[in-house]
Amino acid sequence: MASESTEPEAGIATRAPVLRTEGLTMRFSGPDGEIRLFDGLDLSITRGESVAILGASGSGKSTLLGLLAGLDVPTGGRVWLADQEITALDEDQRARVRGEHLGFIFQAFHLLGGLNALENVMLPLELAGGARARARAGEALARVGLGGRLHHYPRQLSGGEQQRVAIARALVTEPSLLMGDEPTGNLDRRTGEQVADLLFRINREQGTTLVLVTHDPALGERCDRVLNLADGRLEGV
């Protein structure tokens, strides 16, 4: 894949990994017995890289992303995020690591209905004790084209607008690693292109590592690397 970011001193392959798995395994108990979603996945993603994870519906892409982020716990294997083995941490410790290093764009938004757009975006800054939370949240919303919707509640926003609030919330802490589960899936074509441009600009200009789950091959083409999850295996590692 053609990359939108280059380094004059060193290529991507020489950078340190920001995300790594070893023998990652996820199994479920179903009515007809055990279901192996994937078994023994090894993966390494370097700092500043942009990676797309593609695959058919039900292949386990979103589950894999949740495991990489420490939102879920695998049935086997290990995950390192920002040099910390998050599979060896408890839930509170994993949350601390995420708060320090990771921004996550949920496909289902996960906005708090009792908070307006500005307050939803302010929340991660306030939880981390960050300064200028209101101003920074307003700036993040303006970057995704919602500068005029600061005081609207989720129920007053369209699905696409709610997705952009979720993106602003993920960006506001200026994370070193940004993950997105279908980050443009609920947006119209024009808005989706604008949001994608923003994500790749942040990747290029700030060196933010970008990991995206998507059904959109065009979005994958913009990444440094495309991984296909099929039959429990990652192709393109």
Image: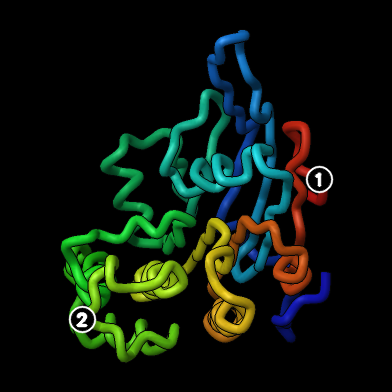
Q: Residue at x 30, y 43 (%)?
A: 93
Q: Which residue is mark 2?
A: 151
- The front one of 107 and 154 is 154
Mark 1 secondary-structure assignment: strand
Mark 2 secondary-structure assignment: loop
Name above or below for residue 30 compared with residue 200.
Answer: above
Q: Which mark is residue 145?
A: none
Residue 175 location, quadrant: bottom left
Q: Position of residue 115 (x, y in %)?
A: 18, 67
Name above or below for residue 84 compared with residue 174.
Answer: above
Residues marked 2 and 1 touching at CB (< 8 Å): no
Residue 231 visible in the picture: yes
Q: Position of residue 180 (x, y in %)?
A: 53, 61
Q: Which residue is mark 1?
A: 235
Residue 73 location, quadrant: top left
Q: Nearer the viewer, mark 2 or mark 1?
A: 2
